[in-house]
Amino acid sequence: MSTDRRLAAATAFWTDENAALEQAEAIALIARQIKFRPRSVQALGVDKRAKYLAGIAQVSDLLAARLLVVYHLEYQRPMMGAFLDALGITHVDGLIEDETPKQPTPDAIQAAADTLSATFPKGDVGRYFWTLLWQDPETWGALQTRPELTELS
C-alpha cells in the first residue's frame, strides 16, 4: 500500500471499536520500535499512533487483516456495495445482511469482478480482492486468478 493509504488504514484502525486485541498488539509493536513503554504509546493521540503504525514495514497476519478490513469499511464502501450488487447479494452500505448468504458461483464472481474492474481503479479492486481472499478463501477462491491482484498501488 502507498504511504497515504497505509496512514489512512492506520487512522481508521485506531477508531475501530472491534479491534481491541489488534490495537494492543500494535501498541506493543510500536513501543518496541520507538523504545517507549506501551502505556506511553497508548497515551499518544490517534494521529501519532497512526503515523507510527503506518511506518512499520512488517506486522502479523492478524494485524494486517484488521488494517485491511477497517480500511475498506472506512474508505471503500461504494466499491464493496457495487461488488455485492453485481453478485445479487443483499447488503447495507457494503455489509452483507444475511448471516448465511447464498454462495456465489465462480462464474458469478468472475462477472461481478469484471464489472468492478471496469468501474473502479484496478489497484483498489486488487486490494479488495486480496482482502476477500484473506478473509474467506473458500467463498472467494474464484478471485485467485484475477489480474487485478498484481496491480496494487
Image (cartoon, rainbow, N blue to C red):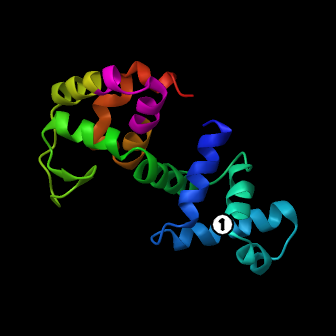
Q: Nearer the viewer, residue 21 or 75?
A: 75
Q: Which residues are magenta?
A: 116-129
- Left/right of residue 39 with respect to residue 138 in the rendered view: right
- Left/right of residue 56 with respect to residue 128 in the rendered view: right
Quadrant location, the N terminus? top right
Question: In terms of secondary structure, where does tag 1 sit?
Answer: helix
Quarter of image, res 114: top left
Residue 153, relative to residue 104: is it above or below? above
| Image x and y of residue 61, in percent | 56, 52
| Residue positioned most to the right | 35
Quarter of image, res 113: top left
Q: Residue drawn at (56%, 51%), measured in percent from left and top?
A: 9
Quarter of image, res 115: top left
| Image x and y of residue 141, in percent | 31, 34
Q: Residue drawn at (26%, 43%), measured in percent from left and top?
A: 81
Residue 124: within the magenta?
Answer: yes
Instruction: Give the labeled residue for mark 1.
Output: 46
Residue type, numbered disc 1? Val
Q: Main secondary structure of the magenta part?
A: helix
The number of discs equals 1
| Residue positioned most to the bottom | 39
| Image x and y of residue 41, in percent | 76, 72
| Image x and y of residue 97, in percent | 18, 58
